[in-house]
Image (cartoon, grey):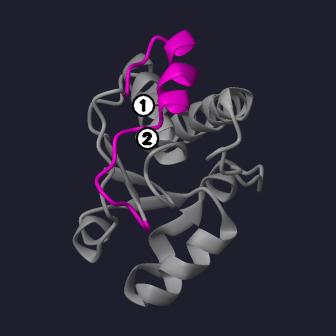
Amino acid sequence: MKIIFACSGNTCRSPMAEALFRKEANALDLAQVEVDSAGLLAQGERASVYAVEALRPYGLDIDFRMSKQLDVQLVRESDLVLTMTRAQKQYLQEELPTYADIILTLGEFVGTGDEVSDPYNLGRAAYERCAAQLSVMVKLAAEKVKSFQG
């Protein structure tokens, strides 16, 4: 199974979600799950400094992470694309209607319906709140994936 986390620039939310999910997947022994992240408007930038700092308390390091563009090839190779907002989901479903059924918001997938607000340019505290929200949501996502695998 391959899961892609998607956001706007792939410098904040989706790389944080990817790293947090990978940690949960390892804890749950989800060896068959591949996880990645990409952005709708990614431009090959490093992860945000505040995103890097927000993940340190979780024992994670995304300082090496370079953003990448979400393209049809990545979506085609995936079983699930999880966006941070309904607007991102809608955009992707309109652009890639063939894959609309595998594109959900993270909140829809875990059953909360919550959106993950973009912390970009909002300071360290916004990134810390985002990381805390994502930590809870990806834990639920990993548990749900584990239940699929029996």
- 97, 11: nearer the viewer: 11
- Dot 1, how many residues are within 10 Å of its Cα: few (below 14), some (14-19), or many (20+)? many
Residue 59 in percent (x, y) is at 46, 11
- Dot 2, how many residues are within 10 Å of its Cα: few (below 14), some (14-19), or many (20+)? many
- 149, 73: nearer the viewer: 73
Q: Which element is circle 1 on?
A: helix
Residue assigned mark 2? 15
- Vertical relation: 98 (above or below) 69: below
Query: In which quadrant of the rendered view does residue 123 lie?
Result: top right
- Vertical relation: 122 (above or below) 19: below
Tell me if I can see residue 73 in this picture. Answer: yes
Residue assigned mark 1? 19
Q: Residue at x 62, y 29 (%)?
A: 135
* Mark 2 vs mark 1, CA separation in Å: 6 Å
Q: Which element is circle 2 on?
A: helix
Residue range in magenta is 40-62
The answer to whether marks 2 and 1 mark residues whose Cβ atoms lie closer than 8 Å is yes
